[in-house]
Each structure stands twice: as structure tokens, then as C-alpha cells.
Amino acid sequence: MPQPPRCLVPDVDHDPIQLDAGARHHLGRVLRMRPGDALQLVDGRGGLADARWAGTAPAIERRHPRRAPPADGVTLAVAVPRLPRLDWLVEKAAELDVAALRLLETEHGQRAVSAGRIERLARKADEALLQCRRLHRLAIHAPAPLAAVLDDHRSHELWLAAPGADEGAAPGAEASGRRGGPLLVLVGPEGGFSQDEIEWAQAAGARRATLGHTVLRVETAALALAARAAEWSLRP
């Protein structure tokens, strides 16, 4: 049986439910919902409610207990890739249930990201939230220096993406598991992190994480490590 469509609202606990013009258009004109059709409402903060379309607004049938974000959430701290690839990175990070995306200003890679672009990326992440049926928004932060990001995540386990495994080394040999708490994955630009940046990360406790003997694109490495982290977090 197909699952009902979802709609993002400001707060599932608000009564009456507030819908903006875009949401009303999507439900009424794009999905062509009829009165009585089932849908679900989410607010991106762990709230979920079952509802029925009432013609111009949803009528709540049941509110589910609000869910807290995962305690072992993954944050990707990534040097800004080329902008079309950044859009793709955001969409796939949302699908992989990444908690947050921190864009990095690095010595070997400086790409400006406007406030308008950040808003567009947030909308793309919200679209992916509905499609993949996650309950918490992917937080997207404007570019910041590596040192500032490390300072903001002192309590996180740290993985430092290595561009390629040393000859003879097993992929992922140094970051071979998770410790059970929140994780910050650091991925540098195409030219790699500078030696100073590598030393800052290692001084903060980062472990090298490799994915084979090839050099991956920024967005590929970030998503591959996010998937590996999710896999390890599910192991008994």
C-alpha cells in the first residue's frame, strides 16, 4: 500500500495547522488531493502527524510522539565543490540522514557561497526530507574556516578524509569503526587540506579515513564516508 504524501509545516503541534501558499498549491493543484485524502505533516524538528485533506487545509487525526534527533548524528564538513555538485551533495546528504552540512573555507579551495545559494540549498534539502521521509531537517551552514568548525565540534569524534590510501594500507584502516557519539567528517578541496589544516585536525583528535587507492571528488568522498559511518552505527 503506498504511503501518504508528506507536507512540511512550521509546527505540527500548532492548531490550526499553518500552510504557506506553496504548500497549498502543491497539495491542491500538483497532487490534486481531494477532501478526505490521507497525508502526513512534518515540521523538520521530529514532529509527525497523520491528517486528512479538508479542501483548503489539513485536519489532524493523530499526532505522533516527537522524536529527538539521533545522538550519533553525522556532520559533514566539506570544502565547497563546484556549485552544480554542491546541489547534488545536499540532496544526497539529506537522503543519507546526515544531520548537518558545514561548508569549509580552506587554504587550497576558496569558493564563495551567497546567502541566496544557502537558502536554495535549504529548500533542496527540505524537498529531499519529504521524499526520503526523514523527520529532522538537514542543517546547512555558510562557509567557515576549518579552525572555527573544529572549535564548534569539540565533543565530536573526528574523521579526516585522506585523498587515497597509502600503498599497501587497507582502506579505512585508521578509522575502522565508530565510538557511538556524534561524528564530524572533514573533507578537503580538490587540492587537499594544507599541512597546517591537517595538523590542526589531528591535534583535535581526527583519525584518517580512506576509501581505497583512488582520489575521489569532494562530494563523492563526503557521501561515501557518510554511508560508511551510517553502516558502522548500525552494527551491534
Image (cartoon, rainbow, N blue to C red):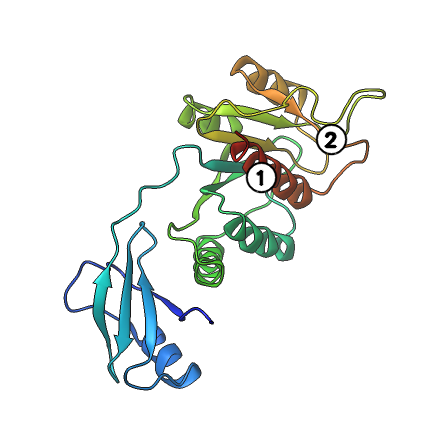
What's the residue at 46%, 26% (across, down)? 180
Q: Badge 2: how crowded within 10 Å, few (<14), some, or many (20+)?
A: many
Q: CA distance from mark 2 to mark 1?
A: 16 Å
On screen, residue 108 versus residue 170, left or right, reads left
What's the residue at 44%, 29% (across, down)? 182
Task: List x then y, in percent, for residue 73.
Answer: 45, 36
Q: Nearer the viewer, residue 67 or 216?
A: 67
On screen, residue 172 versus residue 112, left or right, reads right
Which label belongs to residue 55? none
Residue 216 lies, with reference to residue 23, above or below; the image says above
Q: Would you name the residue on which mark 2 appears?
A: 163
Task: List x then y, in percent, for residue 27.
Answer: 36, 78
Residue 124 lies, with reference to residue 77, above or below; the image says below
Q: Badge 1: how crowded within 10 Å, few (<14), some, or many (20+)?
A: many
Task: List x then y, in percent, for residue 18.
Answer: 22, 69
Taking the view exactly as shown, the residue that stands out farthest to the top is: 203
Whether residue 113 appears in this view of the structure is no
Taking the view exactly as shown, the residue that stands out farthest to the right is: 167
Q: Would you name the residue on which mark 1 appears?
A: 226
On screen, residue 108 versus residue 57, left or right, reads right
Q: Secondary structure at mark 1?
A: helix
Q: Are marks 2 and 1 in contact (CB under 8 Å)?
A: no
Q: Secondary structure at mark 2?
A: loop
Residue type at mark 1 is: Ala
Q: Which quarter of the figure has residue 209?
A: top right
Q: Nearer the viewer, residue 137 or 110?
A: 137
Whether residue 123 appears in this view of the structure is yes
- Mark nearer the N terminus (2 vs 1): 2
Residue type at mark 2 is: Pro
What's the residue at 44%, 49% (across, down)? 138
